[in-house]
Amino acid sequence: MDGGNRASRTDDDRVDDTQAGDTRTAIMDATYRALCTQGYADLTVAAIAGEFDKSKATIHYHYDTKDDLLAAFLDYLLDRFVDRLSADAESGPEARVTAIADALLFDMDDPDGDRDLHTALLEIRAQAPHRAAFREQLTANHTFAEDLLTEAIADGIDEGVFRAVDPRSTARLVLATMLGGRVYDLTLDDRDVAADVRTALDDVVLEPLRAPDGTGTGSSDGPGSPNGSNGSDGSYNPGDESG
């Protein structure tokens, strides 16, 4: 009898966990819609509650403050980023690097898609120096993307697809380029800047990164430090630069 009761409670717990997960997902979806229509500055918990069939009390039950909710939303966006790249997880290094770069900028086939959301996220990013919850989650998101890109570049070096460069420094350059392109696109009247940045990334960074003979042993004039070697884990071992 006791065993049956324990099993019953376990089943109930699983149902509760599923329902809680469904509610949190619904809150994230509502936050997405509210950010697109309200922006960060005018966003309220009431506005989020108005985007789905739950009350403000439900939101406050899961998140103590609006900052906590928005930090969770940034984590939710990281999950979406991972889902977007999942189809390319088994692709070769070059395809993975390209997919990550594209995902970090905009959908170039639909540059206006999610533009309102990206504008709101830029507002959230601007608050990060003053709000620890935002800063910590943005750091986690950046670290994940950097590690993913570093691994893809290191794999390409090991397979002879890319020249011998510092994978992490190159990953940081790509990330900074994509973030800069996104910020310029959102804050300037020039609507061609995102596409121009993406093209320049190919011409200036990614194309020189490719090994011309497919061996990865050609002259290392591409991004990153030229005279080092790379471990299989993506770490960089400085070579003799004294000469």
Image: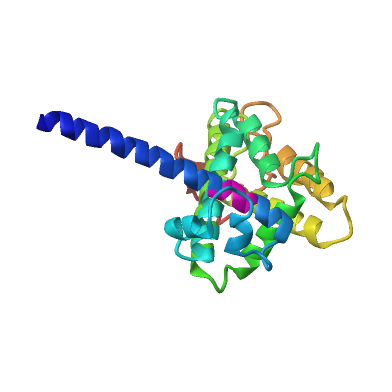
Indicate the position of residue 53 as horizontal and vertical percent values.
57, 48
* Prevailing secondary structure class for the magenta stretch in the rendered image: helix
Find out whether residue 69 is within the magenta segment: no
Indicate the position of residue 30 as horizontal and vertical percent values.
61, 50
The N terminus sits in image quarter: top left
Which residue is depicted at the point 52% across and 39% down?
Answer: 151
Front one among 93 and 213: 93
Which residue is depicted at the point 54% across and 45% down?
Answer: 26
Q: Quadrant of residue 219?
A: top right
Front one among 179 and 1: 1
The answer to whether any part of residue 72 appears in the image is: yes
The answer to whether any part of residue 146 appears in the image is: no
The C terminus sits in image quarter: bottom right
Which residue is depicted at the point 49% across and 47% down?
Answer: 24
Indicate the position of residue 105 as horizontal and vertical percent values.
71, 47
Which residue is depicted at the point 42% across and 40% down?
Answer: 19
Outermost bottom residue: 130
Find out whether residue 30 is within the magenta segment: yes
Front one among 1 and 122: 1
User: Which segment is the magenta one?
Assistant: 27-32
